[in-house]
Amino acid sequence: MKHGVIFSALLVGSALLLSACDNGGKTEVDANATKILDGKASIVMPEGFVRMPQEMLEARYPAEQRPQEAWYVESEGGKVAIVFNLTDNAISEAQVPKLAEIMKQQMSDFSPSISEVTVNGRKMSRLEMTTPTEEGNIYNLMQISSRDGKFLLSAFNTAEELKEKYAPAGQAALSSLKY
C-alpha cells in the first residue's frame, strides 16, 4: 500500500509554515520500551510489531516521502504500521495545534478530525482520518509533536478491515511516546 502521498503532503506543507525555535529538551527513554529514532525517543510497541527492513521501507516509500523508521505487523503483509519521522523543521510545542489545523485543511478531502492530547507531559495534536488507496481504505492516526524544537510526526495506519483489531494498540502505542 502506498502511504507516501499523504506523508509527503504533510511534510512538504508543514515545512513551509514553521518558524525557528529551540526548546533545549532532553532525551528520556524508558528502559522497558522500544527505543526509536536512534535512541532519541521510546515507545511501548504493540506485540507483534517488528522493525521494517530498510529495503522494504525504500520500496514502500519514495525517498522524498520516506519516514526515518517504520514498524509493522509482518503477518499482516505490511497492512499495519507505525512510522516515525523527526524532521529538521523547527516547531515549538505551542505551534503544534496550529500546524495540526493547517494539516487538517490540507487533508480536508479526507474529513480529518483533530484532537489535542498530552503524552508523558507533552502537548501533542492528533489527526484521524480514513484515506482511499488502490488496495482499499486506510485508517490513519497521525500524532504531531515537537521534540527538541523539531517537528516529529508519529503515525499509526492500518487497512480499514483490520482497524478493529489493531487501532486500540496503535493508539496506546502513540500514547506511550516518550522523549
Image (cartoon, grey):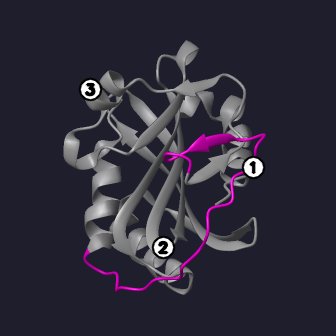
Q: CA distance from mark 1 to mark 3?
A: 31 Å
Q: Which residue is mark 1?
A: 30
Q: Which residue is mark 3?
A: 59
Q: Which residues are magenta?
A: 16-39
Q: CA distance from mark 2 to mark 1?
A: 27 Å
For marks 3 and 2 on the same chain, the one whose residue lies earlier in the sequence: 3
Say which of 59 and 167 sits in front: 59
Q: Residue at x 47, y 36 (%)?
A: 70
SS at mark 2 in the image: helix
Question: The residue under label 2 is which amino acid type?
Answer: Ala
Q: Quadrant of the N terminus?
A: top left
| Magenta residues, dominant SS class | loop
Q: Residue at x 57, y 13 (%)?
A: 75
Say which of 174 and 92 sits in front: 92
Residue 130 x, y percent position in the rendering:
49, 48
Left or right: where does residue 62 sit relative to residue 31?
A: left
Residue 169 x, y percent position in the rendering:
72, 38
Question: The residue under label 3 is which amino acid type?
Answer: Ala
